[in-house]
Image (spheres, rainbow, N blue to C red):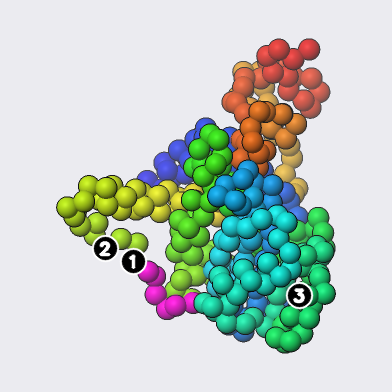
Amino acid sequence: MKFQINCYVESCEICQRSKGHVLNYALNLLSIPAGPWEDISYDFIVKFPKCKGYDSILVVVDCFSKMMHLIPCKEAATAEDIAQMFLEHVWKLHGTPKRTVSDKGTTFNSKFLKALYKSLQINPSFSTAYHPQSDGQTEIKNQWLEAHLRPFINHRQSDWVDWLPPAEFAHNNARSEATGKLPFEIVYGHSPVISPLLELTRSPDADDRAKQLAETIQEVQASIKWAQEHYKQANTGKPPPEFQPGDKVWLLASNIILQHPSKKFDYKQYGPFPVHRKSGLSCLLPGSP
C-alpha cells in the first residue's frame, strides 16, 4: 500500500509542477537547546502578492521542538514592528528565549533589537546572507511553506493569508523527522483535537465549514509528508540522469516569465514534455532549433 502511494505521489503532475528541486549543501549544526522555545530561529519570506494588507511572512521556529509560527506581515516592517509581532505571537505563548538565530539583514541587526536583546538577556546569532547552511532549518521551513501554498491558493494568488493557520497547525501536528515526535506533543504534552467527530448540527453552513477544515488539515498533512521525504539532503555524487528520445521531462520555470502577480507562486516546472532528440548531455524538446 505504501509503495503504491509513494509511486502515485511521485507521478502526480501537480506535485511535480509545484515542488522545487532541493539544493545540495551541507548544514552547519547548531548547539542543542535545553528545552522548548529557549532557542529560536526566524526569517522573512517576502515578495508575496498583496493579501489583506500583507506581502510577507515572518517564520519563527523553535529549535528544540521544531514548532513553527507563521505571522503575516509587511516587507517594510521595522525592528519595532518585529518586536511587536514577537510579543503578540510568540512571547505571550512561550516566554522569552535565551538565544535567537536570524540573518544579517539591517532590520534584524538594528540598534533597537540589539538593545532589546541586551535588556532581555537574549544571545543573538546571525546567519550569513545567501548561505542557508547557517540557518538551515528555517530555510527548509520556508521552502516547504512556499511549496505547500502553491497548489492551494487561487489563480489570482490573493488568498495565501487564509492558508497560513491550517498550514501552521498541520506542521505542528506532524511528526518531525528530527525529533520523531509531534511539536505539539513536545511543547504541550499532547496532540490537540482536530475536530470532535464532526457531529452534524442544524446549520448547514457550519457543517460545510467544519468538513472543509478537516479536509484542509488532511491535505496539508499529506503535503508535509511529501516535503519531509523530498527535503532530505541529496547525494551530491550522483551522476546526471540520461534521457532518450521519447522520454518525458520537466522544464524548469526559473527563466520563464508569466503574467502572474507574483513569481513566488508560479509553478517550479512545466510539462512533462517528450524529448525530441539528444545533443551532447542536453536533450531537445519539440520546437527546439
Relative to residue 195, is residue 39 drawn left or right? right
Q: Residue visible at 63% across and 58% down?
A: 73
Q: Residue visible at 60% across and 75% down?
A: 87
Residue 196 in magenta?
no
Which of the pair 216/58 is nearer the observer?
A: 58
Q: Do the residues under discs 2 and 1 have CB atoms within 8 angstroms?
A: yes
Q: Main secondary structure of the magenta part?
A: loop
In the drawing, what numbered circle is on residue 113?
A: 3
The answer to whether residue 128 is above or below residue 205 is: below
Residue 31: x and y in percent read 71, 77
Could you tell me the amino acid type at mark 1? Answer: Val
Q: Do the residues under discs 1 and 3 have CB atoms within 8 angstroms?
A: no
Q: Which residues are magenta?
A: 187-193
Residue 98: x and y in percent read 67, 83
Relative to residue 199, is residue 61 drawn left or right? right
Where is residue 81, by image quadrant?
bottom right
Q: Of callouts 1 and 3, which one flags the residue occurring earlier in the amino acid sequence? A: 3
Mark 2 lies on residue: 196
Residue 192 in magenta?
yes
In the drawing, what numbered circle is on residue 244?
A: none
Could you tell me the amino acid type at mark 3? Answer: Leu
In the drawing, what numbered circle is on residue 193?
A: 1
